[in-house]
Amino acid sequence: MIIQENIPLSAYTTFKIGGPARFFCTVKNEEELVEAVKFAHEKGITDATSSGAHLPFFVLGGGSNLLVSDDGFPGLIIKNEIRGVTTELDIESVTSESGFKFVSAGSGEIWDDIVAYTVDRGLFGIENLSAIPGTVGATPVQNIGAYGAEASHTISSVRALDTKDFDPAMPKFVELSNTECKFGYRDSIFKHEPGRYIISRVTFKLSKKGDVTMNYKDTRDYFNDKKILKPSIAEMRRAIVEIRTSKLPDWSKLGTAGSFFKNPYVSAVKFAELKAKYPTLPGFPEPDGRVKISLGWIFDKACNARGLMIGNAGTYEKQALVLVAKPGAKAVDVKAVADELITRVKEKTGIVIEPEVEWVG
Ligand code: EPU
Protein backbone atom coordinates (compact mmCIF):
# COMPACT_ATOMS: atom_id res chain seq x y z
CA MET A 1 0.00 0.00 0.00
CA ILE A 2 1.40 3.35 -1.06
CA ILE A 3 0.71 6.56 0.82
CA GLN A 4 0.65 9.55 -1.49
CA GLU A 5 0.68 13.21 -0.52
CA ASN A 6 -1.29 16.27 -1.64
CA ILE A 7 -3.68 14.49 -3.98
CA PRO A 8 -6.46 16.71 -5.41
CA LEU A 9 -9.84 15.29 -4.43
CA SER A 10 -11.88 16.90 -7.20
CA ALA A 11 -11.24 13.87 -9.42
CA TYR A 12 -12.70 11.60 -6.74
CA THR A 13 -16.05 13.30 -6.14
CA THR A 14 -19.13 13.51 -8.37
CA PHE A 15 -19.37 17.24 -7.60
CA LYS A 16 -15.87 17.38 -9.20
CA ILE A 17 -14.95 19.75 -6.40
CA GLY A 18 -12.39 19.55 -3.62
CA GLY A 19 -8.89 20.63 -2.62
CA PRO A 20 -6.02 18.23 -1.87
CA ALA A 21 -5.82 15.41 0.65
CA ARG A 22 -2.74 15.76 2.87
CA PHE A 23 -2.29 11.96 2.58
CA PHE A 24 -4.07 9.53 0.28
CA CYS A 25 -4.04 5.74 -0.11
CA THR A 26 -6.06 3.03 -1.82
CA VAL A 27 -7.00 -0.14 0.07
CA LYS A 28 -7.95 -3.38 -1.68
CA ASN A 29 -8.57 -5.69 1.28
CA GLU A 30 -9.10 -5.67 5.05
CA GLU A 31 -5.36 -6.04 5.78
CA GLU A 32 -4.58 -2.89 3.79
CA LEU A 33 -7.43 -1.11 5.55
CA VAL A 34 -5.87 -1.94 8.92
CA GLU A 35 -2.49 -0.73 7.60
CA ALA A 36 -4.04 2.59 6.54
CA VAL A 37 -5.63 3.17 9.94
CA LYS A 38 -2.33 2.19 11.57
CA PHE A 39 -0.56 4.86 9.47
CA ALA A 40 -3.03 7.48 10.69
CA HIS A 41 -2.42 6.45 14.29
CA GLU A 42 1.37 6.48 13.95
CA LYS A 43 1.28 9.80 12.15
CA GLY A 44 -0.78 11.25 14.96
CA ILE A 45 1.89 10.39 17.49
CA THR A 46 4.81 11.64 15.44
CA ASP A 47 3.24 14.56 13.60
CA ALA A 48 3.13 17.63 15.82
CA THR A 49 0.68 19.44 13.53
CA SER A 50 -2.12 16.91 13.91
CA SER A 51 -4.65 17.34 16.68
CA GLY A 52 -5.88 14.50 18.85
CA ALA A 53 -4.46 11.00 19.17
CA HIS A 54 -4.38 10.23 15.46
CA LEU A 55 -4.32 11.95 12.13
CA PRO A 56 -7.94 12.34 10.99
CA PHE A 57 -8.92 9.87 8.31
CA PHE A 58 -11.87 9.67 5.97
CA VAL A 59 -12.98 6.68 3.90
CA LEU A 60 -13.90 7.54 0.34
CA GLY A 61 -16.15 5.35 -1.78
CA GLY A 62 -17.60 6.72 -5.01
CA GLY A 63 -17.50 10.30 -3.70
CA SER A 64 -21.13 10.70 -4.74
CA ASN A 65 -22.54 12.10 -1.52
CA LEU A 66 -19.79 14.49 -0.51
CA LEU A 67 -18.87 18.13 -0.71
CA VAL A 68 -15.13 18.46 -0.14
CA SER A 69 -13.76 21.79 1.05
CA ASP A 70 -11.76 23.91 -1.39
CA ASP A 71 -8.93 23.71 1.17
CA GLY A 72 -9.00 19.92 0.95
CA PHE A 73 -8.67 17.46 3.83
CA PRO A 74 -5.86 17.78 6.39
CA GLY A 75 -5.66 14.04 7.15
CA LEU A 76 -5.57 10.68 5.37
CA ILE A 77 -8.10 9.84 2.67
CA ILE A 78 -8.57 6.07 2.44
CA LYS A 79 -9.96 5.21 -1.00
CA ASN A 80 -11.92 2.01 -0.58
CA GLU A 81 -11.46 -0.54 -3.35
CA ILE A 82 -12.34 -3.68 -1.38
CA ARG A 83 -14.01 -5.89 -3.98
CA GLY A 84 -15.55 -9.36 -4.24
CA VAL A 85 -19.07 -10.76 -4.36
CA THR A 86 -20.36 -14.06 -2.98
CA THR A 87 -23.84 -15.57 -3.03
CA GLU A 88 -25.20 -18.12 -0.60
CA LEU A 89 -28.54 -19.76 -0.17
CA ASP A 90 -30.25 -19.26 3.16
CA ILE A 91 -29.81 -22.60 4.93
CA GLU A 92 -33.34 -22.37 6.32
CA SER A 93 -34.85 -21.74 2.92
CA VAL A 94 -33.14 -24.47 0.92
CA THR A 95 -36.25 -26.61 1.02
CA SER A 96 -38.80 -23.86 0.51
CA GLU A 97 -39.53 -22.53 -2.94
CA SER A 98 -39.90 -18.97 -1.83
CA GLY A 99 -36.65 -18.47 -0.04
CA PHE A 100 -33.83 -16.02 0.22
CA LYS A 101 -30.33 -15.70 -1.02
CA PHE A 102 -27.60 -13.80 0.72
CA VAL A 103 -25.45 -11.66 -1.54
CA SER A 104 -22.35 -10.39 0.16
CA ALA A 105 -20.32 -7.66 -1.51
CA GLY A 106 -17.05 -5.91 -0.74
CA SER A 107 -17.70 -2.32 0.29
CA GLY A 108 -15.64 -0.95 -2.61
CA GLU A 109 -17.81 -2.62 -5.26
CA ILE A 110 -19.75 -0.23 -7.50
CA TRP A 111 -23.30 -0.22 -6.13
CA ASP A 112 -25.06 -0.39 -9.48
CA ASP A 113 -22.95 -3.40 -10.55
CA ILE A 114 -24.31 -5.26 -7.53
CA VAL A 115 -27.88 -4.26 -8.39
CA ALA A 116 -27.34 -5.52 -11.95
CA TYR A 117 -25.81 -8.74 -10.57
CA THR A 118 -28.86 -9.45 -8.38
CA VAL A 119 -31.36 -8.53 -11.12
CA ASP A 120 -29.55 -10.88 -13.55
CA ARG A 121 -30.01 -13.68 -11.01
CA GLY A 122 -33.71 -12.97 -10.50
CA LEU A 123 -33.31 -11.81 -6.90
CA PHE A 124 -35.84 -9.26 -5.60
CA GLY A 125 -35.11 -6.41 -3.23
CA ILE A 126 -32.74 -3.76 -4.58
CA GLU A 127 -33.92 -3.28 -8.18
CA ASN A 128 -35.62 0.04 -7.26
CA LEU A 129 -32.23 1.29 -6.11
CA SER A 130 -30.82 1.00 -9.64
CA ALA A 131 -28.54 3.65 -11.13
CA ILE A 132 -27.60 5.30 -7.84
CA PRO A 133 -23.96 6.37 -8.08
CA GLY A 134 -21.52 5.27 -5.39
CA THR A 135 -20.19 2.14 -3.76
CA VAL A 136 -21.70 -0.65 -1.66
CA GLY A 137 -20.05 0.66 1.52
CA ALA A 138 -22.06 3.88 1.36
CA THR A 139 -25.43 2.15 1.16
CA PRO A 140 -25.80 1.37 4.88
CA VAL A 141 -24.22 4.63 6.01
CA GLN A 142 -26.91 6.85 4.57
CA ASN A 143 -29.45 4.07 4.11
CA ILE A 144 -29.94 4.96 0.46
CA GLY A 145 -33.53 5.06 -0.72
CA ALA A 146 -35.46 5.62 -3.91
CA TYR A 147 -38.81 4.74 -5.48
CA GLY A 148 -40.24 3.16 -2.34
CA ALA A 149 -37.21 1.00 -1.51
CA GLU A 150 -34.55 1.50 1.14
CA ALA A 151 -31.24 -0.31 1.59
CA SER A 152 -32.30 -1.15 5.16
CA HIS A 153 -35.15 -3.36 3.84
CA THR A 154 -32.60 -5.87 2.49
CA ILE A 155 -29.37 -5.37 4.45
CA SER A 156 -28.83 -8.45 6.60
CA SER A 157 -25.51 -7.49 8.18
CA VAL A 158 -22.56 -5.15 7.84
CA ARG A 159 -18.95 -6.12 8.51
CA ALA A 160 -16.74 -3.28 9.67
CA LEU A 161 -13.44 -2.44 11.30
CA ASP A 162 -14.22 -0.90 14.69
CA THR A 163 -11.60 1.82 15.09
CA LYS A 164 -12.61 2.71 18.65
CA ASP A 165 -9.60 1.92 20.90
CA PHE A 166 -7.79 0.77 17.75
CA ASP A 167 -4.92 -1.64 18.38
CA PRO A 168 -2.96 -2.48 15.18
CA ALA A 169 -1.82 -5.76 16.73
CA MET A 170 -5.43 -6.79 17.34
CA PRO A 171 -7.73 -5.01 14.87
CA LYS A 172 -11.36 -5.60 15.75
CA PHE A 173 -13.80 -6.45 12.94
CA VAL A 174 -17.47 -6.56 13.93
CA GLU A 175 -20.56 -7.92 12.18
CA LEU A 176 -23.49 -5.60 12.85
CA SER A 177 -26.99 -6.96 12.37
CA ASN A 178 -29.71 -4.95 10.64
CA THR A 179 -31.10 -3.90 14.05
CA GLU A 180 -27.68 -2.92 15.34
CA CYS A 181 -27.25 -0.62 12.32
CA LYS A 182 -30.13 1.53 13.75
CA PHE A 183 -31.46 2.49 10.34
CA GLY A 184 -33.72 5.49 9.81
CA TYR A 185 -34.54 7.76 6.88
CA ARG A 186 -31.08 8.46 5.37
CA ASP A 187 -29.71 7.57 8.79
CA SER A 188 -27.80 4.82 10.61
CA ILE A 189 -25.38 4.17 13.47
CA PHE A 190 -22.58 5.00 11.02
CA LYS A 191 -23.79 8.58 10.96
CA HIS A 192 -24.27 8.75 14.73
CA GLU A 193 -20.73 7.59 15.40
CA PRO A 194 -18.88 9.07 12.42
CA GLY A 195 -15.44 7.61 11.80
CA ARG A 196 -15.83 4.75 14.27
CA TYR A 197 -16.72 1.96 11.85
CA ILE A 198 -15.09 1.38 8.48
CA ILE A 199 -17.32 -0.91 6.47
CA SER A 200 -15.60 -3.72 4.57
CA ARG A 201 -18.54 -5.92 3.46
CA VAL A 202 -22.32 -5.69 3.27
CA THR A 203 -24.61 -8.72 3.12
CA PHE A 204 -28.05 -8.39 1.54
CA LYS A 205 -30.91 -10.84 2.03
CA LEU A 206 -32.83 -11.02 -1.23
CA SER A 207 -35.99 -12.92 -2.13
CA LYS A 208 -36.04 -15.58 -4.80
CA LYS A 209 -39.73 -14.89 -5.37
CA GLY A 210 -41.97 -11.88 -4.99
CA ASP A 211 -43.40 -8.77 -6.54
CA VAL A 212 -41.54 -5.60 -7.32
CA THR A 213 -42.30 -2.56 -5.15
CA MET A 214 -44.66 -0.20 -6.98
CA ASN A 215 -45.76 2.18 -4.24
CA TYR A 216 -44.18 5.25 -5.83
CA LYS A 217 -46.04 7.55 -8.20
CA ASP A 218 -43.30 7.73 -10.83
CA THR A 219 -43.05 3.94 -11.22
CA ARG A 220 -46.84 3.47 -11.15
CA ASP A 221 -47.27 6.09 -13.90
CA TYR A 222 -44.47 4.52 -15.95
CA PHE A 223 -46.04 1.05 -15.97
CA ASN A 224 -49.63 2.35 -16.35
CA ASP A 225 -48.49 4.14 -19.51
CA LYS A 226 -46.97 0.94 -20.80
CA LYS A 227 -49.99 -1.12 -19.66
CA ILE A 228 -47.75 -3.49 -17.72
CA LEU A 229 -49.56 -4.79 -14.64
CA LYS A 230 -46.89 -6.96 -13.08
CA PRO A 231 -43.41 -5.85 -14.10
CA SER A 232 -40.47 -8.22 -13.81
CA ILE A 233 -37.38 -7.29 -11.84
CA ALA A 234 -35.52 -6.50 -15.08
CA GLU A 235 -38.40 -4.30 -16.29
CA MET A 236 -38.35 -2.43 -13.00
CA ARG A 237 -34.60 -1.86 -13.27
CA ARG A 238 -35.06 -0.52 -16.81
CA ALA A 239 -37.89 1.75 -15.62
CA ILE A 240 -35.84 3.18 -12.77
CA VAL A 241 -32.87 3.84 -15.05
CA GLU A 242 -35.17 5.67 -17.50
CA ILE A 243 -36.95 7.68 -14.79
CA ARG A 244 -33.69 8.68 -13.12
CA THR A 245 -32.11 9.62 -16.44
CA SER A 246 -35.04 11.87 -17.31
CA LYS A 247 -35.21 13.57 -13.87
CA LEU A 248 -31.69 13.72 -12.54
CA PRO A 249 -28.55 15.24 -14.03
CA ASP A 250 -25.92 13.04 -15.64
CA TRP A 251 -23.14 13.35 -13.09
CA SER A 252 -20.53 12.43 -15.68
CA LYS A 253 -21.41 15.74 -17.38
CA LEU A 254 -22.54 18.05 -14.55
CA GLY A 255 -21.12 18.09 -11.01
CA THR A 256 -23.72 16.89 -8.50
CA ALA A 257 -24.28 14.71 -5.45
CA GLY A 258 -28.00 14.11 -6.07
CA SER A 259 -30.42 15.36 -3.42
CA PHE A 260 -28.46 17.81 -1.31
CA PHE A 261 -30.89 17.92 1.62
CA LYS A 262 -33.09 15.38 3.40
CA ASN A 263 -36.83 15.66 3.07
CA PRO A 264 -38.06 17.08 6.42
CA TYR A 265 -40.42 15.34 8.82
CA VAL A 266 -43.00 17.55 10.52
CA SER A 267 -45.82 16.97 13.03
CA ALA A 268 -49.38 16.46 11.73
CA VAL A 269 -50.27 19.87 13.19
CA LYS A 270 -47.41 21.58 11.36
CA PHE A 271 -48.35 19.77 8.14
CA ALA A 272 -51.96 21.04 8.42
CA GLU A 273 -50.61 24.57 8.94
CA LEU A 274 -48.40 24.27 5.83
CA LYS A 275 -51.25 22.76 3.79
CA ALA A 276 -53.41 25.78 4.59
CA LYS A 277 -50.70 27.98 3.09
CA TYR A 278 -49.64 25.59 0.28
CA PRO A 279 -52.63 23.34 -0.59
CA THR A 280 -50.75 21.19 -3.14
CA LEU A 281 -47.69 20.49 -0.94
CA PRO A 282 -47.04 16.70 -1.09
CA GLY A 283 -46.92 14.95 2.31
CA PHE A 284 -46.49 11.31 3.27
CA PRO A 285 -47.78 10.26 6.71
CA GLU A 286 -45.50 7.95 8.71
CA PRO A 287 -46.69 5.27 11.17
CA ASP A 288 -45.41 7.42 14.09
CA GLY A 289 -47.81 10.27 13.17
CA ARG A 290 -45.22 12.54 11.56
CA VAL A 291 -45.48 13.60 7.93
CA LYS A 292 -42.58 13.54 5.49
CA ILE A 293 -42.84 16.52 3.15
CA SER A 294 -41.25 17.11 -0.24
CA LEU A 295 -38.48 19.65 0.06
CA GLY A 296 -37.97 19.71 -3.72
CA TRP A 297 -41.54 20.98 -3.99
CA ILE A 298 -40.91 23.64 -1.31
CA PHE A 299 -37.73 24.84 -3.05
CA ASP A 300 -39.59 24.96 -6.35
CA LYS A 301 -43.09 26.20 -5.53
CA ALA A 302 -42.72 28.01 -2.19
CA CYS A 303 -39.20 29.42 -2.59
CA ASN A 304 -39.12 29.86 -6.36
CA ALA A 305 -35.64 28.32 -6.31
CA ARG A 306 -35.76 25.77 -9.14
CA GLY A 307 -32.91 26.72 -11.48
CA LEU A 308 -31.52 29.26 -8.97
CA MET A 309 -27.82 29.90 -9.72
CA ILE A 310 -25.20 31.59 -7.56
CA GLY A 311 -21.93 31.82 -9.45
CA ASN A 312 -21.33 28.44 -11.03
CA ALA A 313 -23.55 26.45 -8.67
CA GLY A 314 -27.28 26.14 -8.31
CA THR A 315 -30.35 23.92 -8.19
CA TYR A 316 -31.07 21.57 -11.09
CA GLU A 317 -33.65 22.93 -13.50
CA LYS A 318 -35.73 19.70 -13.43
CA GLN A 319 -35.41 18.84 -9.72
CA ALA A 320 -34.73 21.62 -7.21
CA LEU A 321 -33.62 19.27 -4.40
CA VAL A 322 -30.60 18.38 -6.53
CA LEU A 323 -27.72 20.84 -6.43
CA VAL A 324 -25.43 21.09 -9.43
CA ALA A 325 -22.01 22.59 -10.04
CA LYS A 326 -20.82 23.79 -13.42
CA PRO A 327 -17.14 23.42 -14.36
CA GLY A 328 -15.06 25.82 -12.31
CA ALA A 329 -17.48 25.87 -9.37
CA LYS A 330 -15.96 25.86 -5.90
CA ALA A 331 -17.23 24.27 -2.70
CA VAL A 332 -17.97 27.79 -1.41
CA ASP A 333 -20.32 28.37 -4.37
CA VAL A 334 -22.30 25.21 -3.55
CA LYS A 335 -22.30 26.20 0.10
CA ALA A 336 -23.65 29.66 -0.80
CA VAL A 337 -26.55 28.03 -2.69
CA ALA A 338 -27.23 25.67 0.22
CA ASP A 339 -27.18 28.55 2.73
CA GLU A 340 -29.56 30.58 0.55
CA LEU A 341 -31.97 27.62 0.40
CA ILE A 342 -31.77 27.10 4.18
CA THR A 343 -32.66 30.78 4.70
CA ARG A 344 -35.55 30.77 2.20
CA VAL A 345 -37.13 27.62 3.63
CA LYS A 346 -36.86 28.94 7.20
CA GLU A 347 -38.54 32.18 6.09
CA LYS A 348 -41.37 30.49 4.17
CA THR A 349 -42.09 27.50 6.40
CA GLY A 350 -40.21 27.90 9.68
CA ILE A 351 -38.49 24.57 9.03
CA VAL A 352 -34.74 24.15 9.59
CA ILE A 353 -33.56 21.79 6.87
CA GLU A 354 -30.68 19.33 7.10
CA PRO A 355 -28.13 18.46 4.41
CA GLU A 356 -27.99 14.88 3.20
CA VAL A 357 -24.62 15.43 1.57
CA GLU A 358 -21.63 15.12 3.88
CA TRP A 359 -19.12 17.95 4.28
CA VAL A 360 -15.45 16.88 4.20
CA GLY A 361 -12.79 19.36 5.20
N1 EPU B 1 -41.05 18.42 -6.82
C1 EPU B 1 -41.37 19.64 -7.38
N2 EPU B 1 -40.36 20.40 -7.86
C2 EPU B 1 -39.05 20.03 -7.81
C3 EPU B 1 -38.72 18.78 -7.24
C4 EPU B 1 -39.74 17.99 -6.74
O1 EPU B 1 -42.52 20.01 -7.43
O2 EPU B 1 -38.20 20.81 -8.26
C5 EPU B 1 -42.12 17.55 -6.31
C6 EPU B 1 -42.33 16.32 -7.23
O3 EPU B 1 -43.21 16.60 -8.28
C7 EPU B 1 -42.92 15.31 -6.27
C8 EPU B 1 -42.21 15.64 -4.95
O4 EPU B 1 -41.76 16.99 -5.05
O5 EPU B 1 -44.27 15.49 -6.09
C9 EPU B 1 -41.07 14.70 -4.61
O6 EPU B 1 -40.11 14.69 -5.68
P1 EPU B 1 -39.40 13.32 -6.16
O7 EPU B 1 -40.40 12.27 -6.40
O8 EPU B 1 -38.46 13.67 -7.28
O9 EPU B 1 -38.57 12.83 -4.91
P2 EPU B 1 -37.71 13.58 -3.80
O10 EPU B 1 -38.39 13.43 -2.50
O11 EPU B 1 -37.35 14.98 -4.22
C10 EPU B 1 -36.36 11.45 -3.16
C11 EPU B 1 -34.93 11.09 -2.89
C12 EPU B 1 -34.19 10.85 -4.20
C13 EPU B 1 -34.89 9.72 -4.94
C14 EPU B 1 -36.34 10.15 -5.19
C15 EPU B 1 -37.15 9.06 -5.87
C16 EPU B 1 -34.38 12.18 -0.77
C17 EPU B 1 -33.57 13.25 -0.11
N3 EPU B 1 -34.29 12.13 -2.10
O12 EPU B 1 -36.36 12.71 -3.82
O13 EPU B 1 -32.88 10.42 -3.89
O14 EPU B 1 -34.26 9.44 -6.17
O15 EPU B 1 -36.98 10.44 -3.91
O16 EPU B 1 -37.46 8.07 -4.95
O17 EPU B 1 -35.05 11.41 -0.09
C18 EPU B 1 -30.65 11.22 -3.56
O18 EPU B 1 -30.77 10.91 -2.38
O19 EPU B 1 -29.58 11.71 -4.02
C19 EPU B 1 -31.77 11.05 -4.46
C20 EPU B 1 -31.76 11.48 -5.73
Image (cartoon, helix red, strand yellow):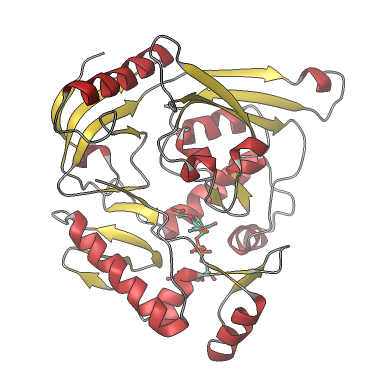
Residue 258 % position (x, y) = 39, 54
- Answer with the quarter of the image where residue 341 lies: bottom left
- Residue that appears at 13% across and 54% down: 328
Q: Position of residue 104 (x, y in %)?
A: 58, 23
Residue 215 image offset from top left, x and y in percent: 68, 58
The image shows residue 307 at horizontal and vertical percentages of 30, 72
Most foreground residue, 118 or 93: 93
Q: Is residue 149 left or right of residue 16?
A: right
- Direction from residue 337 to residue 99 in the image, left or right: right
Vertical relation: 355 (above or below) 119? below
325 sits left or right of 83 in the view: left
Note whether residue 131 is visible: no
Q: Quadrant of the C terminus?
A: top left
Above or below, comparing residue 241 to residue 311 in the picture: above
Q: Residue at (48%, 36%) from the top-left corner?
A: 112
Q: Residue furthest top?
A: 169
| Residue 126: quadrant of the picture | top right
